[in-house]
Image: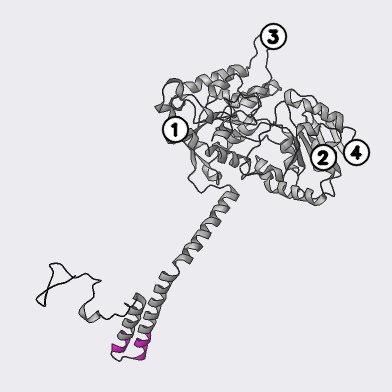
């Protein structure tokens, strides 16, 4: 902006705008050269004004200028491509991390309680006494944890007791200082304690048993309630294995705040167990793993089942299925209790069958599902309320056939459905089973134990939420609401 007085230009008391045109540019101006053009012109000028020097020096100067141009060109014009490559590389890394189950995030810190011996090796000792063992209770190496279908408690305890150098890939790391811990693992052998037969002195009559699971449960909770870290969180950041459906039954209401590792919720009320706060863990399979490849040539039996015919509650369907299936061609269904001989027969039957029946037991789940998986025998699940482990990773529809109970008990329905499955479809099921069976192998270093810890570590944000929430609430308001129950939580969240 200019002001003219009597034909003379008067300068304004502020500097001319940088975009303002001077008198020489009133008719228009040339576009301002870009950075690359200016750089090239400068380079040409530099070369033309350089004193004549030997050819080697001129060549070197030319090379340096060309190299600088190359660097500038890549920086300005290939930034997006480089970012895209990095993004793809990052996505690939994330996929590998997810597929292998190895977390890229910092491991959750777990403190392993040093419980009194009565809750750990003392349980093993009494189990041995009930079966005639004379092992020295003070010699830990002589106390062998016995094999049974609820061995998760032993494998998880053993895993935390190992050196950290042997626990590569785990989602949790053991810490020795409880102040550093995110979670506290309580290594009570609750399932083994439940199956220890009461030991009575000779000629005892009605005398009190030497061992009582109920007393052990009560003593454990009393011990926990005296611990500083239990009081601090009301047990919410504590992890307890109760994989047998009846484990911890006497004190379950006093430990229901904990992360419970359970086989299913068949014996738990909605306010005691939940998919939101707890973890479903697989039974320890009791038959040997099938080591062969996929195929139907050596699997001549259509459907196989071996187990107790008579069960309680939801398991009553077993007797009906026996009546429907026991005379069907290519179907083997027989009664058999847990024994070494029965396990051998079950291994042979599952390894030579296309499908393996999995009806509900006393609770919705049973060990035969996991026996079938490691046998590459396609599970046929007849259990309407079953909960399955690791379902955020495994799509069970790819490895199992689900049949509604009401349909399964119709005469001829089940076998007709299975006979309609083509050999190619059976091979697809078997290939998927082979891919996922490591998740059900407790002995596999990258198998069940690591997957359980991954599931447990995912509970930490909810645990912190509940602990912090309770600190600000008053009285009964702090009680668990819909986010803890297994009936409303999934609908609500």
Nearer to the camera, 360 or 126:
360
For disc 1, the marked residue is 178
Q: Residues within 10 Å of mark 1 (few under 14, many from 20)?
A: some
Q: Position of residue 1 (x, y in %)?
A: 19, 70
Disc with the residue nearer the chain's start (4 vs 3): 3
Disc with the residue nearer the chain's start (2 vs 3): 3
- Dividing the image into 4 quarters, which one contains the C terminus? top right
Q: CA distance from mark 4 to mark 3?
A: 53 Å
Is 70 above or below relative to 265? below
Disc with the residue nearer the chain's start (1 vs 4): 1
Give the residues in magenta.
46-59
Instruction: Indicate which disc residue 327 carries.
Output: none
Q: Indicate the secondary structure of the residue bearing disc 4.
A: loop
Q: Residues within 10 Å of mark 2 (few under 14, many from 20)?
A: some
Question: Is residue 57 in the magenta section?
Answer: yes
Q: Indicate the secondary structure of the residue bearing disc 2.
A: helix
Instruction: Indicate which disc residue 348 carries.
Output: 2
């Amino acid at each position: 902006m200019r002001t003219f007085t009597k034909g003379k230009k008067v300068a304004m008391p502020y500097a001319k705008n940088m975009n303002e045109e001077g008198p020489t540019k009133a008719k228009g101006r040339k576009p301002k050269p870009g950075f690359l053009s200016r750089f090239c012109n400068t380079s040409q000028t530099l070369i033309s004004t350089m004193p004549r020097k030997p050819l080697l020096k001129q060549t070197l100067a030319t090379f340096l200028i060309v190299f600088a141009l190359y660097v500038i060109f890549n920086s300005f014009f290939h930034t997006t491509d480089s970012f895209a490559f990095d993004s793809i590389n990052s996505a690939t890394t994330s996929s590998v991390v997810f597929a292998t189950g190895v977390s890229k995030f910092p491991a959750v810190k777990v403190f392993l309680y040093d419980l009194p011996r009565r809750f750990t090796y003392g349980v093993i000792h009494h189990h041995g006494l009930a079966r005639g063992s004379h092992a020295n209770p003070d010699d830990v190496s002589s106390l062998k944890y016995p094999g049974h279908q609820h061995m998760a408690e032993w494998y998880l305890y053993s895993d935390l007791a190992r050196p950290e150098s042997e626990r590569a890939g785990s989602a949790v790391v053991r810490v020795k200082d409880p102040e550093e811990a995110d979670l506290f693992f309580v290594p009570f052998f609750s399932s083994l304690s439940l199956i220890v037969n009461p030991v009575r002195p000779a000629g005892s009559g009605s005398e009190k048993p030497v061992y009582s699971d109920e007393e052990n449960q009560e003593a454990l909770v009393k011990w926990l309630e005296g611990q500083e870290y239990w009081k601090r969180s009301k047990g919410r950041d504590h992890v307890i294995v109760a994989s047998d459906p009846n484990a911890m039954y006497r004190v379950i209401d006093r430990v229901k705040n904990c992360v419970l590792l359970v086989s299913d919720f068949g014996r738990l009320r909605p306010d005691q167990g939940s998919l939101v706060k707890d973890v479903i863990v697989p039974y320890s399979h009791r038959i040997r793993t099938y080591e062969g490849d996929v195929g139907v040539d050596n699997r001549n039996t259509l459907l196989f089942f071996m187990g107790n015919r008579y069960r309680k509650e939801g398991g009553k369907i077993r007797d009906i299925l026996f009546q429907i299936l026991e005379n069907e061609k290519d179907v083997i269904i027989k009664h058999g209790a847990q024994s070494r001989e029965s396990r051998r027969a079950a291994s042979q039957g599952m390894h030579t069958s296309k499908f393996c029946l999995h009806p509900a037991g006393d609770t919705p789940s049973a060990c035969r599902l996991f026996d079938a998986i490691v046998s590459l025998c396609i599970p046929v699940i007849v259990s309407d309320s079953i909960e399955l482990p690791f379902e955020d990773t495994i799509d069970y529809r790819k490895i199992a056939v689900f049949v509604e109970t009401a349909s399964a008990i119709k005469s001829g329905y089940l076998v007709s459905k299975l006979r309609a499955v083509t050999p190619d479809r059976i091979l697809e099921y078997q290939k998927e089973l082979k891919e996922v069976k490591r998740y059900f192998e407790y002995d596999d270093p990258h198998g069940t134990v690591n997957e359980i810890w991954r599931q447990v570590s995912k509970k930490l944000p909810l645990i912190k939420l509940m602990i912090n929430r309770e600190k600000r609430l008053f009285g009964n308001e702090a009680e668990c609401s819909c986010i803890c129950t297994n009936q409303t939580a999934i609908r609500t969240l």
